[in-house]
Image (tube, coloured by chain):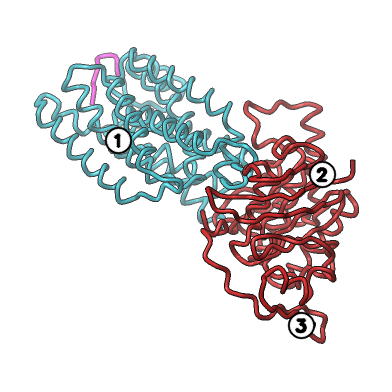
Amino acid sequence: MLIDAAFQGLSWNLAHDVRELFAFHFMVNALLAGTAVAVMGGAVGWFMVLRRQAFAGHTLAMIAFPGAAGATLAGLPIAFGYFGACAAGALALAGVSGRHSRESAATGTVQAFALGLGFLFVGLYHGLLNGLQALLFGTFLGIDDGQVRTIVAVVVVALAALAVGARPLLFASVDADVARAAGVPVRLLSFSFLLLLGLAVAATSQITGALLVFALLVTPAATAHRLTSRPLVGLGLSVAIALVVTWLGLALAFFSVYPVGFYVTSLAFAPYVVARSLRR
Amino acid sequence: MSEAIRLEDAAAARGRHVIWEHVSLTVEQGEFVAVLGSNGAGKSTFLDVVLGLLPLHHGSARILGRAPGDANAEIGYLPQRHNFDASARIRGVDVVRLGLDGARWGVPLPGRPARARKERLREVIALVGAESYAERPIGALSGGEQQRLLIAQALVRRPRLLLLDEPLDSLDLTNQAGVAALVQRICRDEGVAVLLVAHDVNPILGYLDRVVYFAGGTAVAGTPAEVITSETLSRLYGAPVEVLRTGDGRLVVVGVPEPPFVHGSRHAH
């Protein structure tokens, strides 16, 4: 972990600790990017759980890994690698999946190949070897200004698109046949949602790492679906859980020696367990 | 203008295959009409024609006084479907609301329209008698409860014509009669014409005004007493068919020839 002369560690003074959190530029970047990512992950994740596309989401995360590793190898900005790979992966998934997107064998094949490719890139780029853990399990270090700008821009555009299409998407997700009969462009929406999911995965990977994307994308959404069947309340709850989990996770990682991915997943898991035991 | 549907010497074809022809019929406003016939006889094709999804091969059709497809905003349509998955965690009232504004883009704004929307939802849920379970997740409801909410969804925009494709399929006999009684009440009270595609006429026989029977590449329309007879059905099928009436008033059709295999529109998807 980064030990700086200015760093004083955790005290019992909350105001002081929060001030310390914001004293470092890299931490401000992490909090900014984390906030954007949590809002998007919570919202897109809610629809993903409703549409039962968690497997597609997982596959996109596996594609994010070679994307990021490949971008580093090629000397491109890492955000470019994440977003580019996930967008391309979403297009490919939309291509292989039929109307009912049950092409799990094809999807699984792509997933395995993507992971392998990622390791190849990491192997080719020797200097990245230390970064392997960060790519897979997340980091709050080294999120640069450009990355923050890209993430925030993507999230704003994606959320605007989600807001505009929310009702038809809900209709198509709940009842595709009736929605189609009512004039909702079901196929276009299913394609657009995969793209949106790809962007959400790419953004989330940059905080949680490719393997732990689900901590923000699935767990808060699944908890919200357990707790309420009101769509707006559920969406809000999902975003709120993702936000709290991200902020706390980043803060805890900052003050301790354990990686951020561990905190985010554990913090997200706790409310899920509580929600499951509350409601059957 | 009281005719909901008028077909004159109509023929429908899928590709080069003529499904039915020489069909002339009218459905009046407020009538409850069952669409009957074997699989592949052209019942779903008929609904496609009414919705303007399939242009007529021959003849003419007027739907609510307009060309097919032009009046779809005033048609409520419930496609043939399976039940919601048990894990579908969205409330019944939300499913009904999708019928109101689920196809709209953009973010709904609060204010007067929102209150009117709420009021209409309350009204239509009361109409189908779903007040006690509309707030529960749709996946947790029985088939009959889900079907009532889906009918409410199709009714919520005050259509003048309601198309229900085999809504009774997955229901037990009690619920079939319950939904048929509900549909009859909707016809009477709201003046909506209803076309209900059914497999078996018996559960709904007591509630119907008229039937349209598809068989032998054509269709006849009339009251059940006119159409479901040995003479009419034998003529339709071009083979001797006998209609028997059991002691409790049920109709049993005997001797229906096996339908030739037509790419069944019923199983096409």
Mark 2 sits on what residue?
A: B160
Helix, strand, or loop for circle 1?
A: helix
The answer to which of B236 and B93 lies nearer the viewer is: B236
**Looking at this rendering, what residue extends furthest in the bottom direction?**
B247
Q: Position of residue A39 (x, y in %)?
A: 49, 29
Query: Is the residue at mark 3 from the same chain as the one at mark 2?
Result: yes
At 51% across and 25% down in the image, what residue appears? A159
Between the C-alphas of marks 3 and 2, the distance is: 35 Å
Mark 1 sits on what residue?
A: A210
Which of the two marks, 1 or 3, is nearer to us in this view? Answer: 3
Q: Decide if residue A28 is on the left or right side of residue B217.
A: left
At 49% across and 42% down in the image, what residue appears? A221
Mark 3 sits on what residue?
A: B244
Magenta stretch in the rendered image: A1-7
The colour of chain B is: red
The answer to which of B131 and A182 lies nearer the viewer is: A182
The colour of chain A is: cyan
Q: Quadrant of residue A126?
A: top left
